[in-house]
Image (spheres, rainbow, N blue to C red):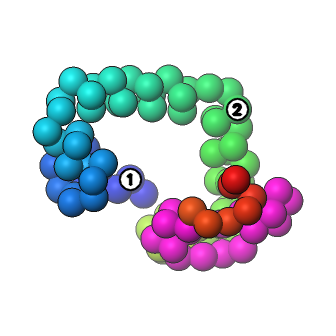
Amino acid sequence: MRNKLAGTKIGNSPSAEYYQKNPEARKKKIAYDTEYHKKPSRRKYRSVLGAINREKGNKIGDGKDEAHVSKNKTVSQSQSKNRGDKKRKFFK
């Protein structure tokens, strides 16, 4: 499910405020993100996570995601917690 606030001018984090005030920088970021997420490695990553979600019975809109806890293991977790978890060693 797509974030309904994505691309809106709602947000008060330092980066959100920066992109609200600097439209040229925002355009550059959007262009970079588009190219990054088109890469075969990112597409495969998303397809693998989608397959795991289907296998484990997570439905679209149920508020759950599969979170990587290691390179080969995932656990079911709320979307907000999973997307906000930046402290795992796996991602460093």
**Mark 1 crowdedness (10 Å alpha carbons): few <14, some 14-19, many ≥20:** few
Instruction: Give residue 54's position: percent from left, percent from top.
Output: 67, 62
Question: On screen, 39 above or below 62?
Answer: above
Q: Is residue 31 magenta?
A: no
For image coordinates 70% across by 38% down, the residue present is 44
- Which one is earlier in the sequence, the residue at label 1 or at label 2? 1
Horizontally, residue 82 falls left or right of residue 40, namely left
Q: Amino acid at mark 1?
A: Arg
For image coordinates 70% across by 32% down, the residue present is 41
For image coordinates 18% across by 30% down, the residue present is 23
Instruction: Give residue 26's position: percent from left, percent from top.
Output: 27, 32
Q: Which residue is mark 2?
A: 41
Horizontally, residue 58 falls left or right of residue 63, namely right
Label 1 sits on a secondary structure element that is loop
Question: On screen, 36 above or below 7?
Answer: above
Q: Amino acid at mark 2?
A: Ser
Q: Is residue 76 magenta?
A: yes
Q: Quadrant of residue 65?
A: bottom right
Question: On screen, 81 above or below 30?
Answer: below
> Which range of residues does the magenta coloring cover?
67-85
**Mark 2 crowdedness (10 Å alpha carbons): few <14, some 14-19, many ≥20:** few
